[in-house]
């Protein structure tokens, strides 16, 4: 594959930046990858494991002469990072981000964008519950969607170049506007995370009553909630603070459906429950047919023997 950007700067060196770096290396998509994280500890680990080609100790040195600068920090930190890098950006460079929310990121970044510098957002729809510089891997984005979200007035060649990078990284591309992006993500990602956090919280309260039974029998559905509920607290706090409207909208609909199911259970309305579960089962089949998950039972997990 051909080099898409001569120099790429990654701000933040966690799961997403690390995986991007390894995937860009695999595809030979960048001439040089420079990286920065706020703590010395993360920068030292990144150097030790050669996560990027060069780790810098300041934001200014990291973005110097970069053709693409990608903000891979929590959504709530993007505005401050953008303000600090703005005076050091090269004319003609593109700034991008990987944030899970887009309207708030646009509002934080665009006012600080210098003349002659492009901005094109992106959101790779892939992740794990792990974070930090050791958590990245080159195949994270393979065959997963990456949503490219550009301002209306964006330079078309800058948009196409960023899309080419994400294709080279292994993703499938779709273009979206920021409002629609935030609503879609509230449905497929943000509200499910909130529900998982709540379910695990409820079970934790119960554990005090039932001793360790919640953990012991957790294979029965609960385990999958715990995986999601182990996701990074900073990242998810910022997601809910910045995608407030869309999350509250979907949460409202969720609560209505939950009440309807609650009523069906109370009234013994088996037909309603059966129809509802048949509809949701078809959604799972659709996800598998679209190649977005495995059809293996229990996601192909190997059973863990109890001690
Ligand atoms: P992560 O593994 O926790 O890494 C975050 C990185 O950002 C760390 O290296 C951290 O540095 C650095 N950082 C935090 N605040 C900073 C600041 N003010 N200045 C400079 N560096 C700073 O997080 P991640 O999972 O890669 O997530 C990064 C972004 O990707 C978030 O915006 C998130 O919404 C988005 N995203 C995440 C997922 C997912 O599933 N994880 C999926 C799609 C998109 P230190 O280590 O020094 O603290």
Image (cartoon, rainbow, N blue to C red):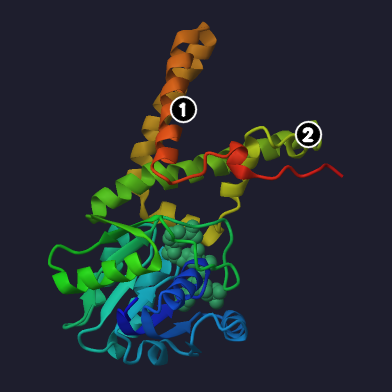
Residue 126 percent location from the top left of the image? 45, 56
Residue 172 position in % (x across, y down): 33, 57
Q: Nearer the viewer, residue 81 or 166?
A: 166
Q: Is residue 247 visible?
A: no
Q: Quadrant of residue 162?
A: bottom left
Which residue corresponds to mark 1? Answer: 281
Q: Residue at x 56, y 84 (%)?
A: 50
Left of 101 or right of it: where is 126? right
Find numbered disc 1 in the image and state the secondary structure of the residue it sits on: helix
Determine whether 244 is above or below 14 in the image: above
Residue 98 occupies which quadrant of the picture?
bottom left
Label 2 – label 1 distance at C-alpha: 28 Å
Circle 2: element type: helix
On screen, residue 193 versus residue 118, left or right, reads right
Q: Residues within 10 Å of mark 1 (few under 14, many from 20)?
A: few
Q: Is residue 299 left or right of residue 161?
A: right
Instruction: State the residue position of label 2.
Output: 213
| 14 to 54, vertically: above or below | above
Q: Is residue 233 above or below residue 188?
A: below
Q: Which mark is residue 29?
A: none
Residue 207 place in picture, x, y as percent: 75, 36
Pointer 2 local density, CA inside 10 Å: few below 14, some 14–19, many at least 20: few
């Amino acid at each position: 594959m051909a080099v898409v950007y001569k120099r790429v700067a990654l701000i933040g060196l966690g799961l997403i930046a690390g995986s991007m770096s390894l995937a860009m290396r695999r595809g030979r998509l960048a001439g040089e990858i420079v990286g920065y994280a706020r703590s010395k500890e993360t920068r030292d680990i990144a150097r030790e494991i050669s996560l990027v080609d060069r780790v810098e100790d300041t934001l200014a040195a990291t973005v110097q002469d970069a053709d693409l600068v990608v903000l891979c920090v929590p959504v709530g930190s993007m505005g401050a990072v953008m303000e600090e890098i703005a005076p050091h950006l090269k004319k003609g460079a593109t700034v991008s981000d990987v944030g899970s929310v887009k309207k708030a990121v646009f509002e934080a970044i665009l006012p600080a964008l210098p003349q002659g510098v492009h901005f094109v957002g992106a959101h790779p729809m892939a992740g794990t519950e792990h974070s930090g510089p050791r958590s990245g891997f080159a195949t994270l984005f393979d065959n997963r969607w990456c949503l490219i979200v550009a301002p209306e007035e964006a330079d078309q060649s800058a948009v196409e170049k960023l899309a080419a990078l994400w294709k080279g990284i292994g993703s499938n591309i779709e273009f979206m506007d920021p409002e629609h992006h935030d609503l879609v993500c509230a449905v497929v990602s943000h509200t499910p995370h909130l529900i998982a956090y709540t379910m695990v919280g409820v079970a934790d309260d119960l554990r005090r009553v039932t001793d360790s039974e919640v953990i012991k029998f957790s294979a029965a559905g609960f385990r999958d909630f715990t995986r999601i509920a182990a996701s990074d607290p900073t990242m998810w706090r910022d997601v809910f603070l910045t995608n407030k409207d869309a999350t509250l909208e979907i949460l409202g609909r969720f609560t209505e459906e939950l009440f309807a199911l609650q009523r069906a259970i109370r009234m013994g309305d088996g037909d309603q429950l059966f129809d509802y579960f048949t509809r949701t089962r078809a959604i799972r089949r659709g996800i598998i047919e679209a190649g977005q998950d495995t059809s293996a039972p229990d996601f192909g997990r190997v059973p863990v023997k109890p001690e």
